[in-house]
Every structure is written in C-alpha cells, then in structure tokens.
Image: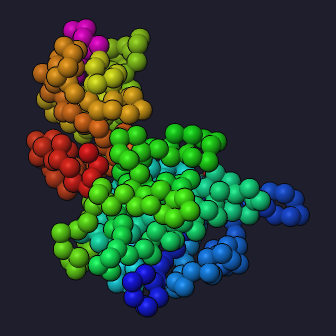
Amino acid sequence: MTNNRKASLLLIYTGGTIGMKVNPEDGTLHPFDFSQILDEVPELGKFAYRLDSFSFDPIIDSSDVEPAIWQDLARIIKDNYDSYDGFVVLHGTDTMAYSASALSFILENLAKPVIFTGSQLPIGEARTDGKENLISAVEIAASLDVQGHPRVPEVCIFFDNKLMRGNRTTKYSSDNFNAFSSPNLAPLAEAGITIRYNDGIIRKPSEWNVPLKINLNLDTRVGILKIHPGITPEVVGDVLCGNSTRAVILETYGSGNAPSKSWFLDVVHRAAQSKILLNVTQCFSGAVDMGIYSNGKALQNAGVVSGQDLTTESALAKLFHLMGNCSDNKEVKRLIQENLRGEI
Ligand code: ASP
C-alpha cells in the first residue's frame, strides 16, 4: 500500500470444496458459515484490510453453475463496486475457468481486481491448499501499483502460487494442487517469498474512472463438437445441423485440422451457411492456423472461423457474450477474432 487508507475487499463465496469443513461427529464434509471466515482463516486478520463477505444462498457445487450464476455474480460486483477496492470470488474448481472467462466478458470497463480462487482440499483439512490460495488472492486483490492504482485490474484465477488471466485458464488436474494452467500466456504473477508481478502483461484500463458496466445478455445456443477418428456423418450432422444451436465450436486436431472427406466438408459447408462455426484446437496449448495444412485450409474454405489460441472455455463464454449482444452472425464472426479482454 502506498497510502494509509485501509484497503477494503469483498469476499464472495459461491460454493465448492474450499468452503467445506469436516464435521467432527461423523467425518462428513459440510459448508461452514462463511460470515465466520476470519475464525476459519485467522491469518487474514493479520492484513490491515477491511474484509467483508457475501455468501450465495444456496451455495453450489460448481458443476451446477449456470449463466444465471454469472449474472448474479456480475450484479453483486456492480452493486458493491464503489465500496470496495477489489473482489475475491471463492468458487468450485470444476467450472472456475468457465466462470472467470464469462465474467471477463460480462464486466465492462473493469478497473479493479476480481480474483477467483478455490481449493482441492477443504479449508478445514490439515493439508488444505485453500488457506494459501485465499490468503495470496486477498493480498493480490489489495495490491496497488506505484501510482496507487490496483495492480491487477483484471478477472483472474489464483491457484497454487500462480495468478493467471481468467479467460486463459483451464482446469487440467483433478487431484494436483496445481489444478489450473494458462497454457498460452505466462502467469500475471507468481507467489514465492514475495509476490512477483509480471507487470508487462497485466492489462490496465485506458481510463481509471469510467463506471463499471455489466452486460448481462448471453445467448447460450452453442454446441461443442470434438473431432475424433471414427466420427460418423450422423453425429456430425446432428451436432452441426440441429436446430438448437446458433454456433458450434469445433475442437479440431493440432493447428486446426479435421478430416478432408467430402461428406465431412459438405456438412461443414452446409452448416456454415447459417451458423457460426468456430475452430479451436483440442491440443492443450498452441493456436489454430488453418493456413498450414490443406485439411485446415479446407475448413476455412468451407466457412469455419479461426478461434486462434482461445481455450474452449473462453470460446464458449465469448460466443455467449457476443451472440447475446448481436443478432448478426457476420458481426459475431468478425468480433470473435478480435482481442476483447486479453483472451487471444
Ligand atoms: N465439485 C467441486 C466444485 O467444483 C470441486 C471443487 O471445488 O474443487 O464445486
């Protein structure tokens, strides 16, 4: 802190493993009363911050997350935006990368930190990773730069000593403490003895005092088709040509390749007349470049749009957001290729 004013943070608990503790009577896990967070993590009291908490009711396992939860989260942040310097969102790990991606698009003109975190082991367990994650997330959310502005005014995930841009992350381990990865962008910060910020890649707003806007329009008519050897014309036809989707994310091989058989390209071509087809790689890291191989070029010629190095989570959230705000598919196809929140 460069001034003496106490930083104030709002901790928002949505649910997930982090908020559980063991019932000593029967050994089962149950959620603790989040308003008592300082009793559970007394270390937080060592910071000279004002920490307030808000708990969703009911709290949820994040595998039950729906866009309505993102809209609620956005409203809570908007309603409290002027009263706090930053926000820490405690969230289950299963869909944290989706929620952080979605919030990055829903929150416009964000100039304060929104740091998602959670844990693999409940906070009430001896070996929990939840305390480390929460304590560092809180410190990061309160951190200011030399001008006195928030150091990380972005939607991020903090997990296992790494601060990552939320819309670049993916959950990649169901049992390691380092459960999240940002395969195409270096961490925004790393926590060791000190927290080392990678200031060169942290996004800052062009103006600090523009009011936060929340854009809650989401069109969820998106399907995902993972290309695989042996995929049949029926499966491809059902997913690409069904009436329930306006866009389909194609998870393709390598740099954006898919079968070159004429039945496949015919279906893709037909679907692309009326739908948005977005190509993302099923590789863990790297980007789509449909200009490298003839199989990729054929997809491009059939009308498929490149998702560049978007994660699937981010591609989904970005489509929900763009389609929710734009009825013209051509315009959505143009905007999906623009870097809106550092997601590309
Ligand atoms: N199923 C839990 C959730 O996502 C797992 C976790 O929190 O890590 O809510």
Q: Specify whether residue 67 is in view.
A: no
**Number of numbered discs on residues:** 0
Q: Residue at x 68, y 77 (%)?
A: 42
Q: Nearer the viewer, residue 264 or 157?
A: 157
Reply above or below: 56 against 236.
below
Q: Residue furthest bottom?
A: 4
In magenta, the rendered stretch is 259-269
Question: Where is residue 288 drawn, in percent x and y?
Answer: 26, 30
- Give the left or right position of residue 122, taking residue 47 as reference: right
Q: Specify whether residue 311 is in view.
A: yes
Q: Which secondary structure type mostly characterizes the magenta part of the structure?
A: helix
- Give the left or right position of residue 334, taking residue 131 as reference: left
Which quarter of the rendering shows the C terminus? Answer: top left
Q: Nearer the viewer, residue 339 or 144?
A: 144
Which quarter of the rendering shows the N terminus? Answer: bottom left
Reply above or below: 14 against 185.
below
Question: Where is residue 259 drawn, in percent x and y?
Answer: 29, 13
Picture quarter containing residue 246?
top left
Question: Where is residue 4 drawn, in percent x and y?
Answer: 43, 91
- Give the left or right position of residue 311, taking residue 270 as reference: right
| Residue 266 on the magenta span | yes
Q: Residue at x 38, y 33 (%)?
A: 285
Q: Residue furthest right?
A: 25
Q: Residue at x 46, y 83 (%)?
A: 8
